[in-house]
Every structure is written in structure tokens, then in C-alpha cells.
Image (tube, rainbow, N blue to C red):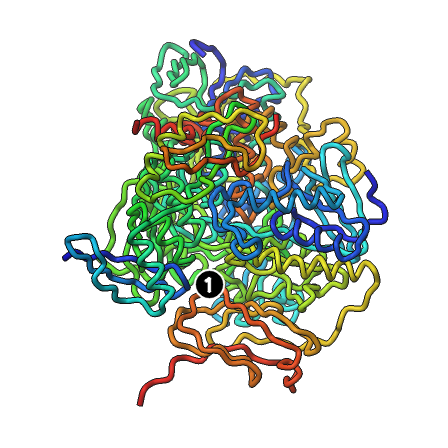
Amino acid sequence: MVEENIVCIGCPLGCRTTLRIDRHGNVVKITGYKCKEGRQYVLEEYHNPVRIFTTTVLTEKSSRPLLPVRTNRPILKSRLKEATLTLVRVRAKPPVRVGQVILPNLLNSGVDVVATDGLLE
Amino acid sequence: MAQMETEVLIIGGGVLGAAVARELSRYKVDAILVEKEADFGWGSTKTNMCIVCQGGDTLEFRPEYRRSKLVWDSMPLMEPLCQELDVPFKKVGELALIRNNEELSKFQKLKSRAEKLGLGGHQFIDQDTLRQMEPNVTREAIGALYDPHIAIVDPVRLTIALIENASQNGVNVMRETQVVRISQEVNQFKVETNRGSVMCRFIVNAAGTSVDKIARLVNSDDFVLYPIRGYVGILDKNLGGFIKHEIHMRPDAPGQMNILTPSVHGNLFFGTTMQPGVRGDCSVKGRIAEIGFQNARKIVPDLSERDIIHSFAGFLMFRNWEVGWHECVVQASQKVPRFISICIGYPGVSAAPAAAHEVTDLLRREGLKLETDESFSPFRKASPVFNELPEEQQKELIAKNPRYGHAVCRCETVSEGEIVEAMRHGATTLDGVKFRTRAGMGRCQGGFCTPRVVKILARELGLSEEKITKKGRESRLLLHKSKELIEAQI
Amino acid sequence: MNYSDIDVAVIGSGPAGMAAAIKAKEEGAEHVLILERQEQLGGLLHQCVHNGFGLFYFGQDLTGPEYGHRFAEKVKDLGIQVLLETMVTRISADRQITAVNNREGVLCLMPRSLVLAMGCRERSRGQLNLPGTRPAGIFTAGTAQRFVNVEGWIPGKKVVILGSGDIGMIMARRLTLEGAEVKAVVEILPYIGGLTRNEVQCLHDFHIPLLLEHTITETHGQQRLEAVTIAKVNKDKKPVNGSHQMIECDTLLLSVGLIPENELSRMAGVALDPLTGGPGVDQWRETSVSGIFAGGNVVHVHDLVDEVSWEAEIAGTSAARFAKKEELEKEKKILKPGRNIRYVVPQTISAQHDVTLYARVKDMEENVTLKMGDIFSKSLRVVKPGEMLKIDLSRSQLRQLKDDAVELSIEGAKRRQ
């Protein structure tokens, strides 16, 4: 039996919950939550912790060295580091529109990395 | 730099070294001034409450105290000097608060003694008059001793102006140049610095917190100096009108001063605690900051800690701590010919004009020929301060140079034009720009303007932004390029 | 450019300024002008590359630049006039604006009404009276954010962050993602200053140590920062003897509070509320000076950008109505902060219209009741200074108010007998 702590971010209470997980990876018990939405969030966060990844990429425009980007959908939390290393190689070439795909299919996840700001020529 | 030759080498670009340089530039004398920091006045000079013509000195004046005499002799010189150099000088007057009869009788004694020496000008004012003059002052004060002569200046601006005028008039001024070794040869000195060596006949040792170290380089240890750490706090400009005069109160504990004063730029300064410290350790100690502010509130109770925008500590060098710090060093060495040391401690700025005359005199007595230079111009024009100009002139300035229309520091309204101008006059660091233009001295303390100033510095110096420093040497601001640290992990 | 006949002038083009300008135009003001000191619309949004913006306003989880872009497009579409790289240097009590730029020099404008949307600035090291040396390497979190996300520089690689406000936590994550080591986030209170969401997604996700009830007692290093000394604090927020330890670092970020930016407001004689640091406003967001309105962080520091825009829209609407010479309801009942309430905005309201109140508590409390006189009462599981309270009041509730002043307060948990 393993225990994992997850803080619920559903409301300002920030309940600190504890999950008990059996050796098959099933959640056997959750304690510490105060509402059903919280319980739901915590379960999802345990089974599928995902994050929207936001960062910057280098550009080919010296007067504006960085372009802010994001994943258009969440990716697995565990892949954030890998995502960072991948994006280091990318160079954004102006002109770039907001929403333009900078790197499609990040780490084969089906998620694209898109520009969140424009880059004029 | 390699090897240079000159008649007089001035070591130290604080207010004293700068004043000497300017004084010497009246004559046909070859002179070089070397300053170890990236800009001028960064040592004892800036650890200053900006007050000149200290009334406290006339009250405690003793003709036999060198320092008192220098301050007294400087008093009529300061205002004309500031006018010539186009730096701010404001006569605010001083109020020494009186809280009880004991303090009253002490002041009465000091006042009558000062009058007997011919140093008049003080008046006692009663509680009602005090309230009218300063409505925000503590109710505990039953009156005050008023000296209308006291003025405020900006010591770093004054120093920079002295340097510029000296430089205009032929003195060779070098920054980031530190003296490492001095050897005595026949009728001259060989002074080695980090940027080459200087052969000179005379040395003026005005090295502030390093005066004794420099003196030891020629085995001229005629004196011992004690580093005393002072603390200054700066209050928001919003409090600008809270008090109009420089106000002080007798300290409640030894080793303290309790002064609250307006500054020429509209802030309030409070200052206190003179304590022995380890030279070079300009850190602000926690308790000192607390005591400092508590003291200020004894003068004006309505001050809030939220109004403190900055504080700093620095060193003043004292000749003799125990005897009451009235001694100072302005002397030709007994052991080494043509070597003059000068160190005034407190109040160095106030004593600077007369001290410079005295040093020039000492040089003459040591054999320096002083022939008046007819081409000497005492006038130095300050760079335009955009937000102080009338609208018509602002428009003209922008039309001539659009950079004056680009505001960089919003708290003090400093334009790009002023920053570039400050760089033309020698600023190469963030602090250099700050002291010359006030960009970064406002209530946000550089939060908004720092990235912009860094960009301008980099552009004008032709350097990458990561080479830009806060105050020279290794004080770089930005250690890594974007993505560099991630690359290193791949 | 035509500067005569301006109906509404808006100072600032961040999430407040753009929202106010758009709303003013939509409410019928013909000539609306935005004055912005930076090179583009959006204010600080451009450097906020993280998401969490617009969850409520747009119903989408956007990044700062994306949020700003939506408004900037609308500003363009509506034909709102924009003056970029233009700094307002003075406002007078009769709404005369003096501004400066490098194309036209000094401009004097006389709009019919004015919206203050200058946002806020960060509390600096000087204001903290933080003891120690003054080396390079100490930045406020927002300044560091500008370097990291816009200028292309990482200040250092061993970082300590003082303060667990949202900006501090966001920068903890950002710097970690840029390859730096964030050694600790140091917070003097027993709880974080910002949103729990950030504690999880910025600190827990990256295993960044959060040291609650700690503070920094000294900085070390002459040229560049070398270390900081931290200590545990007691209930009075004073360092505990013997708890001091040194953390080696080359960068210190300060995230210790935001202060509304009101130099211009002061110049115009606008009365400021010492509890918020911003202008006292009524529910139309009019300040003490007729025709000068204010909205967004310049009035009080918000948690969410969505709220900033919504509040600024009120100011924009009112400014447009004022420019059209419409009468704004003048009745003013004073709202007073009571027990455990730090401030309430707006500071005065009329009892004739629905209104939304914003408030912050001073201290964290659990199981409390939020009360407004006799007319409103709500149980809350928890209240924290870092999470603003929002109270919607209807006209019918307000009509029950008898006195000219009413108190908003937090009633503590009832003790069990």
C-alpha cells in the first residue's frame, strides 16, 4: 500500500488530500477532501496529471529575441522537462501570428506548440 | 595606460579629491586624478546627509580644531561654488529641537560661546513659532535653536561637477584605476596602478576609506584612522513637504545622530548611528535600520515605515574617535616629501572648498610652482534635466534630439536623452547612470527602468547586455543568456 | 493626429486600460484615446507568458499575451486612437494631461473625461529595509520576469525567492524551466501569499522548497550576491535566535507586494485611500475629482486579470457617460472595513443600484461569516488575504440600508459550548 499527497486547487481552501493506492495502482481511499468536486479533481490529478506548458522560444529577430509559446492542449506533467529540452532547438522566424503553430505534434503527443504573441518582420 | 608622467597625482575621486583637482586646475599645473571605482563619490562622499554649512559646527566650534575651521571657512564659498558648477544648493535652515530645560540651557551655553567667537546667526524660537514653521514636528519639542544659514546639496552631483570642471580645465581624470604600489625615487614617485604606472612629483592622497592604506605604501604612517559606519535612510518624495528645514534632535544614546532633512531632489533623508565597523562592510545591520527609523519618528511622529524607499550604509574615516572626532587629516607628511594626505570624515562635503585651498597651499610649500592659468573657466554647465525645464525648452530639446522624448524612468521622469548624455560624461554602469540622472532612485528603485537602462548602456558602449554591471568590476547583472542553462543540461 | 475634442482619455493600455477604452467606445464615446508609455499595447501582459488569464472573462485558459491580443484587436477594430511610447508626465485637477514622446515632443490634451489605468509597481528592497550588502543580483520578481521572458537573459542560476506572492511562485517555475536552480521560496507568513493553484503547479510540480514562517535576515556578497541568511520567525514575525542558516545563491528575487501606481493621481489632487494605496472611488469608479475615473490595479491590487478588466469597464462606461454629460448617481454611502477586513472597493456606493463589492481580509481564518450590516451575510469555509472576496448586492438589499455608513466585517467561527 502506497500513500500519495495531492493538494486540491479547486477553491481557496486548498485541501491537502491523501490517497492510498494498492499494488495494482488502484486508488483505494482518499482522505482530506471537503467536497465532491475536490475528490473528482484529486482523482483526475492522480490518474492523469496534465499541464498546459508555457515557455518562450528563441527567435531569428535580434530586436525581439524571444517569442512566448504554449501547448494548445495540456500534456502530461511528467513530460514537461523533455518538452523544455525539445523547444530549445526551435527558432521562430518572423512574421508570426498569434496562434500560429511553431512546433507541431510535440513529443508525438498530438499536441501542438503555438505562438501566444505576434512577431512582426 | 602604460606609463604616464605628471606633476601632481591625486588619488581618490571623492568630494575632497575632486575639490583639489578643480582647485589645481586654476593653475598651470599638470595633474592626474585616479579613482578606483567606476564613477565618482561612491565611497564616503555618498554616505552623506547632504547637509552643508553645519550649524552644529558653529555651536561646537573651537578655533583650535582644524575641521571646525575648515567648515567655517568653507561656508561663504559653497553657494558661489554650486552656482559656478550648476549644481543644486538650497538654503533650508536648521532647527535644533529643544525638549526640556536641560537641553535649553546646553544650547544657551553653546550659543553664547559661539557668539563670543564671532559666529552668530542663531536664534531661539518658541513653541508656537516652531509649530508654524514645522507643523509636523513632534509635540515634545518646546522650542528650537534656528540657524538660517544651513543648506543642502547633492554631494555626488557636486563631486561629479567638480571633476567635470577640473577635466574641462585640463586635469586628466581616470576611473577604475586603483593604486597598487608607490615607490619613491629621486625627486619623484613611481605610482603603479592596475592600468599602468604614473611618474609624478607630488601626491595628494585623498583616498577616503583607504587614506591610511595609501599612506602606508610610502611608509608615511603619520596617523591612524578609524572607520565609522554611518547609516542613511531615504523617504518617499510624497513626504517632500512634510518638513522644510533640516531638523535634528540630540541623540538619546551615544554613537547616534538624529537628523531628518529634506534633500535637494524632494525626498527626506534620515540619518543616525555612527558606529565603529569593519572597513568595507557597507552592509546595513538589521537593528541599525530599526533604530534609525525610530529616531526619525521622534522628530516627526507621522512617518510610516511604508515610506522608506531605500537605505544604505557607508564609512567615514575619523582621526580620533575617543576625543570627539574634531580632528582631521590635512597635512604634508612629516616623513615623505611632497606627499599630502587629506581626510576629513564628518563633515567632509562642508569642508571641501576650504580644504582644497589648504591642500593647494601645502603643495606650494612643498615646492609646487603655482602659476595662474588665464584660460581657467570656473563655469561648468550641468546636462539638461528634462523634467525641470519649462515646456518650451522641453519641446526644443526633443525637436533637436528625439531621445529626450523617450521616458525611461517613470518615477523620476528621466529620458533616454539624459541617460545617453550621462554616458557621454562618463557613466558606464547602472549606478553611474543612477547617480547622474536619478533613474532608479525613485520609489520603484529601478524596478521598471533597469531593463531599459541596461539596453541603453549596452547599445552606447557597444557591449552585450551581459557585460553591463551595477557598479563596475564583477557586479554583472545578467549572468546567462536565455536557454544557455538548458543547453548545458542536454 | 487629432488631439482636440477627445471624449475619453485612458492612461495605460494593460488589461485595465484597453478594457476601459473599448467599453467607453461601445458606450457611445466617439473619440477615445489611449496613452501608453511602452512600445505596444498590453502593458505587463506581454511578459506574463504563463496561462491562467481569461478563465472567467473569456471562459478560456489563456496566456498573458493571448489575453492582451484579444483586447488589442478590439481596440484596433473599434478605431480607438492609440499613442504609444508616450509618457504622461502631469495631470491637473481640471483633467489637463501633459505627455511626452519623441515624435511630437510635449503634448497638452484636454479630454472631457479621464480613466486612470496605470496599474501597479512592486515593493522594492529599499522598502523592505532588508539588511545586508548591496551587490548585483537582487531583483524584484517582475523585473526578473521582463529579463527572462522578453529581453532574453537569465539573471543567475542559483536563485532564492523572497515572498510567495503569485509573481514569486510563477518565477520559481519559470526559472526552473529555464535551467536555473531555485533553492527556496521564503515566506514570512504561515501560508502562501498567492493562489493555491500556483503553489501546486509552480512549487510542488518542481519540488521547489517552500519555507513558510521564514524570512531573509541578511544578504551577502560585495560585487554579486553570494548568499542570503534566512531564519525562522515567531508569531510576531521576528527572527528566532539560533534558527539562522545561510543559503548560497547568486540571485534573489523579491515578491513582497504590489503597490498601486498613483503618482499621476496625486498630481491631479485625487484623494487616495491609505488602505488600498489607490484612489477612493464610488461604484461608477469615479474618484474624488469630477471626471477622473479609475479602474484595475491602480485602484487596488487584484488577483485575476479578468477582474481587472471588468472593473476597468465600469470606469470606461462611466467616463463615456460623463463625457456625454450624463448625470451619474451622486448618493454616497460609506463602506467601512470592519473586523478582519483590510479594505473594501468601492469605498462609497449608492443604494439605488446593484453593485459588486471587492474586499480583502487581513488574516486567514476558517469557518467565518462575511457580514455587511444587517443586509448581507454569507458563510465561508476559509478567507485568505491572497484571495479577494467578491460580493454582489442587489438594489433591494441595499435599499434596506438606513445609515450613511455601513460596515463590512468578518465574524469568526462560533465556539462550541
The answer to which image quadrant residue B320 occupies is top left
Which residue in the structure is indicated by mark 1?
A: C387
For the C terminus of chain C, the quadrant is bottom left
Front residue of C344 and C57: C57
* Residue at image location 44% in from the left, 53% down from the top: C166
Q: How many marks?
A: 1
Q: Is residue B83 above or below residue C246?
A: above
The amino acid pointed to by label 1 is Glu
- Residue C262 in view, yes or no: yes
Q: Is residue A89 above or below residue B94?
A: above
Front residue of B245 and C311: C311
**Percent from the top left, x then y, of residue B45?**
49, 38
* Residue at image location 45% in from the left, 79% down from the top: C369
- Residue B121 in view, yes or no: no
For label 1, count other residues whose C-alpha is less than 10 Å away and answer few (under 14), some (14-19) or many (20+).
Answer: many
**Percent from the top left, x then y, of residue C19?**
66, 52
Front residue of A92 and B77: A92
The answer to which image quadrant residue B440 occupies is top right
**Percent from the top left, x then y, of residue B142?**
56, 71
* Residue at image location 64% in from the left, 38% down from the top: C40
Q: Residue furthest bottom?
A: C417
Q: Is residue B154 above or below residue C186?
A: above
For the N terminus of chain C, the quadrant is top right
Q: Secondary structure at mark 1?
A: loop
Chain under disc 1: C
Asked if residue B271 lies left or right of residue A43, the reply is right
**Percent from the top left, x then y, of residue B137?**
57, 66
